[in-house]
């Protein structure tokens, strides 16, 4: 007897649709506001090169996300959309679609309202690690497509538990391939396939493992084909070079490490807890504690049901990778966040499932309030978007009549040159006290061989300081 599928309640469906529209509007709000995120500039330049037949830029990352940026620009700019907005709209679309997929997972595990809760957490909570001021999906970065296809891979593997078939295995493999073709870290979504296969093998085909092994091979082949297909527009010669470069670069990058500023200390070997520290930086420690408390409650409920193992296992592997990896850049944990939102929504639903429980209701209410604080703060920042960091400093230089003058930079020289294309940008360890302007970046200065406190003590009285997020502009006051 086939179980009749329940029709989703009207109220949750309408609520989800309304929240999706709000997320789309908020995601696209003031999308052309300038921001000097170095990686965004690199990926946008690579997309520009692709449109002119130049595939040589940024070969250290797979091409799909940059190809999608190029497609969005090609389609939208003839309609009057500015280049910057067109490039960033890819991330906004991924942001909204990821929320819908997260809602599907939440609904599957704990009902329609849990799906709404999971999507709300994803859309409302800030995800602004490192130097990002707004949600990572408001920028033309690789994370948007990587996260979207990673969540789609997990959802596809979960659906395998309902009705395993060659088609569903192929779809799962395709999603893994797309996630990996956006960014190599997307390969972590492959664990969803392995987990789904394990569950199927243990629960339904214990004595017939060969069909599952064959399905795994099918998914792997499809994944590899999809990944390789994103390199086809380059042509065979450039594609071979790019494939070699992406592997060699990532291996060298992992071996060499990356100097990061963690809790006031610069280190090329960040401690195991760095990713959690970065997350707490934009959620606040109370919001961080609330999210992870609900997540652990949700995970404990999901492990008791077969299809929940896929999500929990995938998230666990990602957490272990973040802890063990020699590379711990602030945005690396972004791919984990949608799954945290699902598990947190399931945890919240489990607290509210027991009627008239004062303790459970109180814990749920406190968690919601603690998460609402960073969510509201993030929305306020987005609504009041103004030019940020280097671009805001550039505007101040223009107002001071120094837009084309010399500027000494203790920071990201690439970002400075983009924001100040007419200025003479120079870097020097010891600028004299008569330099018209000094631009310092709080995230870069600790990694440079400079002594900002000594310069301030020697020359500070002759300058006025203007702070723009992580950047400070020092202008001579005479």
Image: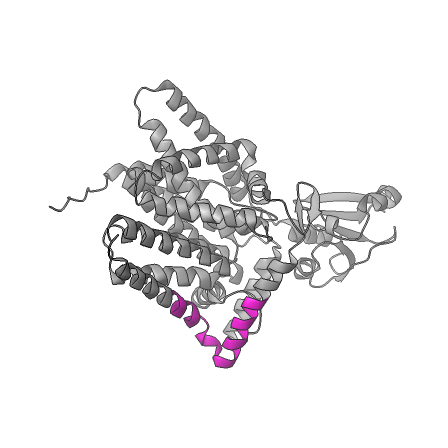
- Comparing 288 with 21, the one in front is 288
- Is residue 214 or residue 137 the one in the foreground? 214
Region in magenta:
223-248
Q: Is residue 432 left or right of residue 218?
A: right
Q: Which is nearer the eye, 301 or 458?
A: 301
- Asked whether residue 90 is in view, the answer is no
Q: Where is residue 386 in the image (x, y as percent from the top left)?
A: 59, 47
Residue 105 is inside the magenta segment? no
Residue drawn at x 23%, y 41% as measured from the top left: 8
Relative image position of residue 257 (x, y in whole percent)? 64, 56
Task: Name the residue rendered at 41%, 63% in the picture.
Answer: 177
Single out the residue that lies furthest toward the front.
Answer: 207
Q: Position of residue 35 (x, y in %)?
A: 60, 53
Residue 151 sits above or below residue 376 on the image = below
Vertical order, 124 against 191 (above or below): above
Q: Where is residue 126 in the image (x, y as percent from the top left)?
A: 50, 42
Residue 296 appears anywhere in the view: yes
Residue drawn where x is 41% and y is 62% of the image: 178
């Amino acid at each position: 007897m086939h179980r009749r599928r329940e029709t989703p309640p009207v109220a949750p469906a309408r609520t989800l649709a309304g929240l999706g529209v709000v997320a789309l509007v908020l995601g696209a709000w003031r999308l052309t506001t300038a921001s000097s995120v170095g990686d965004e500039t690199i990926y946008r330049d690579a997309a520009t090169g692709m449109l002119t037949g130049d595939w040589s830029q940024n070969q250290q990352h797979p091409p799909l996300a940059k190809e999608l940026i190029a497609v969005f620009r090609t389609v939208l700019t003839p309609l009057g959309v500015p280049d910057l907005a067109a490039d960033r709209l890819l991330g906004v679309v991924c942001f909204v679609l990821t929320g819908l997929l997260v809602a599907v997972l939440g609904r599957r595990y704990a009902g329609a309202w849990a799906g709404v809760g999971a999507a709300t957490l994803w859309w409302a909570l800030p995800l602004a690690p490192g130097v990002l001021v707004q949600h990572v999906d408001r920028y033309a970065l690789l994370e948007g497509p990587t996260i979207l296809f990673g969540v789609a891979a997990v959802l596809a593997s979960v659906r395998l538990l309902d009705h395993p078939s060659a088609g569903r295995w192929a779809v799962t493999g395709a999603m893994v391939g797309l996630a990996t073709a956006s960014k190599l870290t997307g390969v972590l979504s492959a664990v969803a396939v392995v987990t789904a296969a394990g569950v199927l093998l243990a629960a339904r085909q214990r004595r017939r493992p060969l069909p599952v092994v064959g399905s795994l091979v099918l998914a792997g082949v499809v994944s590899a084909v999809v990944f390789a297909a994103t390199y086809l527009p380059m042509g065979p010669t450039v594609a071979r070079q790019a494939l070699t470069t992406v592997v060699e670069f990532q291996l060298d990058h992992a071996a060499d490490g990356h100097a990061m500023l963690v809790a006031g200390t610069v280190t090329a070997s960040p401690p195991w807890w760095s990713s959690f520290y970065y997350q707490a930086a934009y959620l606040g420690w109370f919001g961080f504690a609330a999210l992870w408390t609900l997540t652990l409650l949700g995970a404990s409920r999901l492990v008791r049901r077969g299809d929940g193992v896929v999500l929990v296992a995938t998230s666990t592997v990602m957490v272990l990778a973040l802890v063990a990896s020699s590379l711990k850049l602030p945005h690396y944990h972004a791919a984990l966040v949608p799954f945290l939102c699902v598990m947190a929504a399931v945890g919240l639903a489990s607290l509210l499932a027991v009627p008239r429980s004062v303790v459970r209701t109180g814990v749920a209410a406190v968690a919601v309030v603690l998460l609402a604080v960073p969510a509201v703060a993030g929305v306020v920042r987005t609504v009041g978007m103004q030019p940020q960091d280097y671009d805001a400093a550039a505007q101040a230089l223009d107002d001071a009549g120094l837009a084309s003058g010399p500027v000494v930079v203790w920071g990201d020289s690439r970002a400075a040159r983009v924001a100040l294309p007419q200025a003479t940008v120079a870097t020097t360890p010891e600028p004299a006290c008569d330099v018209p302007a000094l631009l310092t970046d709080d995230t870069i200065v600790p990694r440079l061989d400079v002594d900002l406190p000594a310069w301030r003590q020697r020359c500070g009285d002759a300058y006025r300081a203007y702070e723009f997020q992580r950047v400070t502009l020092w202008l001579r006051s005479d």
